[in-house]
Amino acid sequence: MSFGKMNTFVDIISPKPVKDSEGFAEKGDVILASVRAYKEDRHGSEKWANRAAFSQASALFRFRRIPNLEITTDLVLACSDGRYNIVSVEDVKGRGMYIEVLAEKEAKASGKG
């Protein structure tokens, strides 16, 4: 994977509740790392047809493995397109150099109310 293809900046976020000054828990985020990644949106190619088991995944991200940081499905990826919930994590070719993540785009909350 060359740096030319890794042109999307991604924040790896751990969503954690944060207490406000009055002691109420609010939704908060802790950014664990910011990395460059290769991003591929879902389309009708043969590769995506083979990933049918992950039908809810809407994007694929590949980035370099970060030492001392385990990427799990509890984390969220954020880029300029929005936030993505991680569906699956895989070590590319089992070499420990790159991580491949299939993710589902978070639905925006409706502004009506």
Image: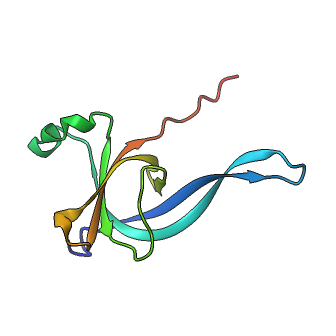
| Numbered circles on residues, count | 0
Quadrant in the picture for the N terminus: bottom left
Closer-to-camera residue (30/36): 30
| Image location of residue 47, percent across then percent down | 13, 46
Q: How is the image coloured?
A: rainbow
Q: Quadrant of residue 44?
A: top left
Q: Quadrant of residue 66?
A: bottom left
Residue under the image location 48 percent in, 54 percent down: 75
Residue under the image location 55 percent in, 57 percent down: 14
Residue under the image location 32 percent in, 41 percent down: 58
- For residue 49, above or below residue 13: above
| Image location of residue 78, percent across then percent down | 48, 55
- For residue 41, above or below residue 69: above
- For residue 1, above or below residue 22: below
- For residue 10, above or below residue 56: below
Closer-to-camera residue (83/85): 85
| Image location of residue 40, percent across then percent down | 26, 52
Closer-to-camera residue (45/85): 85
Which residue in the rendered view is the most extreme toward the top? 113
